[in-house]
Amino acid sequence: MRINRLLIRESGPLRNVDIYFKPVTLIIGDNDRGKTTIINWLGHGLFEKPHPLPNGETWSDNIGTDSLVQMQVSRFDNIYDPRRLKNLLFVREGELSPKQHNPEQALKFWDNEVRALIYGQDDISGQLQHNFLKAMGVGRSGKHAWLNAFHDKLLRFKDALEDILPETQELYHKENQINQLNASLGAVDEQENYMRSQEDVYYLMDKLDLGKKYIDLMNQKKELEQHQDDAFSDKSLGELMIQKSARLEKTEDALKALKREINRLKNKEQHFEHEQLSKYGYSLARNLINLMIGVILVVAGLYLAFKSIRHIGMTPMKISALVVFISGLFFVLKTFYFEMMNAWGIEFLADDTRLRKFEKLLGKKQCEYEKLEQKYFEQRDEYRDIMAEVRRSKGKQLFETRENQRTRIVRTLENVRDTVFKVFGFDQPRDVLAEINNIRDYLNNNNVDFDYMDLYRVRRQKNDIVHQKSQQAKDYEKMKNNIFGTLKPILDELKDSGYPDAVKRFYPEVSEWHIREIQDIFDLREKIDPVVDRVAKDRHYAEILVDLCGDLSKKTETLLEKTLQNPFFEYIVQYTFGGKYKTFVAALEDKHIRIFAVDGHGNTFSLETLGAGASMQFWMILKWSLAKELLGREDGIIVLDDPFSYFDALRSKNLIDVLKAFVQEGWQVVCTMQDNKLLYDYFESLFGPYLEATNLNRDYY
């Protein structure tokens, strides 16, 4: 199986990438340049295409209106054949994961010459653990690998704590600012509440002014109406005009009242019809059911009588037939005659009579409305004729002046009347005047000292404080999230590595008090507030953790020095299952690999414990001796996504040496990496013309 070419045209950074593959192909680029996208498309072609491809043909996927991805591979039989899976290493960023459907298949990935042995003891501790590890050929070396990883995490935790110590002081200062703003806000709230109580009294003063304005308008209107006839030289014409105007207003009010009465009767009639429909619908359904029961009983009685007609005498069957028949007949007669014809008919007749009364009354009101409306139109025409004659009279100018005054007062009065009714609950001048007197008496007995500008200034001060508090709270939450975001991943890693339980195992001289202090922070690590409260706000506690991590780091370095003399090669693979980290430790013994699972406590687990579909992640570097054991007689493909980001220069060169061993055995290697001239030169020195490099930043290789 060989990858020959990959063409990608998409809207992202990979606008037009055309890669031709050699035995060793490097894809170089900075972050966010599309390296992982290329690896994903390779994985899609190698693992997920549903049909085998003939030799030399290509597959293509449209990933947009103007995007295309094509990949060309050499002929192979069936990509899902497990015998092919063992010759395909697909390494995500920081991860070596053969494409597998379950862990058992993943373990069979290793070459047929390698024996993968799973030891299933549930718990191995103390001397038994030491003997077991020694028999496996790992001994202190396995402990060394765990300690090395643990040491790196300890240093990261220590550095993170030291980095956030300055932030804790700012966080503490920010919290004090928020507390001070809360105290200021409480004082302003108390002042505002007092002024609002004064405002309630002031509201009565507004109510008093409104009532007085209403009474004054009513008096002005009444005075104009009383002296309206003074505008005319002809007294009889003025009196007639006033009389016609009053009669027209009275007719208009009666017309509006009659309209409201008609609408009320219509609504009542509709409600009654709805009730009748519901009542008779239910009654009809009930009577039909009773009628059906009666018919069924009659038919059953006739059937039993027919069956017993051959028997002589009064047999039990005949008696039963007679009883059933009579019962059914009773149901039919009772339901049909007494319910539906008699009682239901009488009730229906009564309801119908009531409905007809509604309709008759409504018709009567409609006739009254039409007559009154006709009367209103006649009176309006008479009033208009009188008004035309008034305008032609000698007092036209004086009349128009007073009529305009009256019109203006009436319009103002209509607006004021609505407000008065909402405020007082009534609009009769006599009632409003009584309420005015009550308010005046109350205000005379209460000293009112209130200024709206003072209330405005207090409310503006309150809004400013609320705004400042909101901004400070946002900054406070942002700082808390930053601190928590720094600590949480490292806390998870240390916890999943068995820390702080590992401290008890490897560092017995550490005091129980320190263990409890460490345990507290890990028990609370899922919640942001306890973590920040304990680590960020308690500087003494944070300093204790820093000192403890530094002490543990030194002890770890000492232990590491003692474990470096182990002759066996080992590496660590971590996989995630159920949210907890376990560790695979593999060691060479008699040119074979023995594999077993170990967690941070030193406990071992069987294959069933691992669970199906667990993905395996490389923690340390593959070395030459392991590569020799992996090599088989058939070729294969290794795809690695940026593996050198996790290693120093020495380990990176060791990995390249491993890849050389695979290439010499006929394997194809595809690898992404950062723009690193030193590593590229080392690749070029080993592979020469068999190396192809594509630089996504700039193509100068």
Image (tube, rainbow, N blue to C red):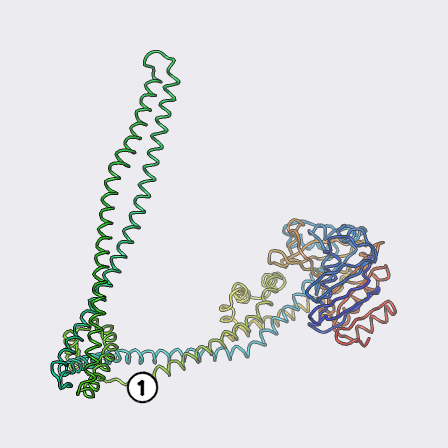
Give residue 664's quadrant in the image.
Answer: bottom right
Q: Nearer the viewer, residue 337 or 663?
A: 337
Q: Position of residue 109 (x, y in %)?
A: 75, 53
Residue 171 visible in this rendered orientation of the protein: yes
Q: Determine whether, in the image, residue 355 is placed left or right of residue 162.
A: left
Q: How packed is label 1: few (under 14 Cα within 10 Å), some, or many (20 or more)?
A: few
Q: Position of residue 277 (x, y in %)?
A: 31, 47
Q: Quadrant of the C terminus?
A: bottom right
Residue 626 visible in this rendered orientation of the protein: no
Q: Position of residue 340 (x, y in %)?
A: 28, 37
Q: Residue at x 22, y 66 (%)?
A: 374
Q: Residue tagged by mark 1? A: 453
Q: Nearer the viewer, residue 449 or 577?
A: 449
> Which residue is situated farthest in the top direction here?
312
Q: How many marks?
A: 1
- Note whether 106 is above or below 513 in the view shown: above
Looking at the picture, which amino acid does disc 1 mark?
Met
Q: Determine whether, in the image, residue 622 is placed left or right of residue 530.
A: right
Q: Nearer the viewer, residue 676 or 394?
A: 394
Q: Position of residue 30 (x, y in %)?
A: 72, 74
Q: Determine whether, in the image, residue 352 is placed left or right of residue 50.
A: left
Disc 1 on helix, strand or loop? helix
- Note whether 588 is above or below 281 in the view shown: below
Give residue 222's quadrant in the image.
Answer: bottom left
Q: Residue at x 21, y 65 (%)?
A: 372
Q: Quadrant of the N terminus?
A: bottom right
Give residue 139's quadrant in the image.
Answer: bottom right
Q: Nearer the viewer, residue 44 or 159?
A: 44
Q: Determine whether, in the image, residue 295 is placed left or right of residue 111.
A: left
